Amino acid sequence: MDYTLAILFSLLQLLSGGTAAPLQEEVVKMKSKVKWMAEQLMVRLDKDFLVPAGLTLSPPADDLDGPSSIVAVLEGYNSLISDTLNGVSQVKFDISSLTGYLDQWRQGHCSEQRPKPSVPGPLQELQSRKEFIHTVSIEALMRVKEFLNLLLKNLDHLETC
């Protein structure tokens, strides 16, 4: 009888350990893919879009509060980038790919859905100045770059649902 209980306990430990490992492996894989996508987007932004002389941005005030807030911020900036700006279509596609991947991962791995995060201050400010299409687009591109830098330095925030 004691052997049966010991074997059952060992099997239970094995099963509980076995189910926890793939989740950590999935998180590592997701973070690795997000890092790669963000780095590729940074390279494209560095290569295709130079910061105009005299353009200074206020310090980033965007939040990294899990995948849902990251998706909201990147989608918000992406919506402000004008399609008429030269060479921007691939950047917009890359941003959409990154947000789509993060959103899909969040929906598949976060059981508790959080309410949609509020729009951060810098994004709200840009949205209020939509009449200056190209100026807003360039600033949105620069803010995407800053946000990606912040994300790359804080990939652990992706683990928070």
Image (tube, helix red, strand yellow):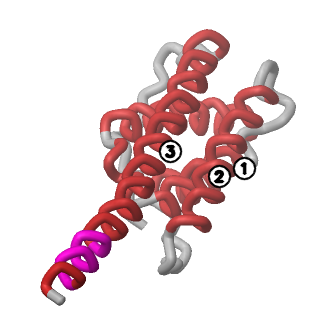
Residue shown at 55%/14% (left/top)? Answer: 46
Magenta region, residue range:
5-12
Q: Nearer the viewer, residue 41 or 53?
A: 41
Between the C-alphas of marks 2 and 1, the distance is 6 Å
Residue 54, percent across and down?
47, 19
Going by the numbered disc 2, the residue's amino acid type is: Glu
Magenta span has 7? yes
Q: Does 123 sit left or right of 18 as displayed?
A: right
Classify 135 as above or below 66.
above
Question: Which secondary structure type mostly characterizes the magenta part of the structure?
Answer: helix
Name which of mark 1 and mark 3 comes first in the sequence: 3
Q: Which residue is mark 3?
A: 30
Q: Which residue is mark 2?
A: 75
Q: Which residue is mark 1?
A: 79
Residue 139, percent across and down?
57, 34
Q: Contact, CB < 8 Å: mark 2 with mark 1?
A: yes
Which element is circle 1 on? helix
Closer to the camera: disc 1 or disc 3?
A: 3
Residue shown at 49%/61% (left/top)? Answer: 69
Magenta span has 76? no
Instruction: Specify the quadrant of the image occupied by residue 103.
Output: bottom right
Between the C-alphas of marks 1 and 3, the distance is 24 Å
Residue shown at 74%/36% (left/top)? Answer: 92
Going by the numbered disc 1, the residue's amino acid type is: Ser
Going by the numbered disc 3, the residue's amino acid type is: Met
Classify 52 as above or below 22.
above
Between the C-alphas of marks 3 and 2, the distance is 19 Å
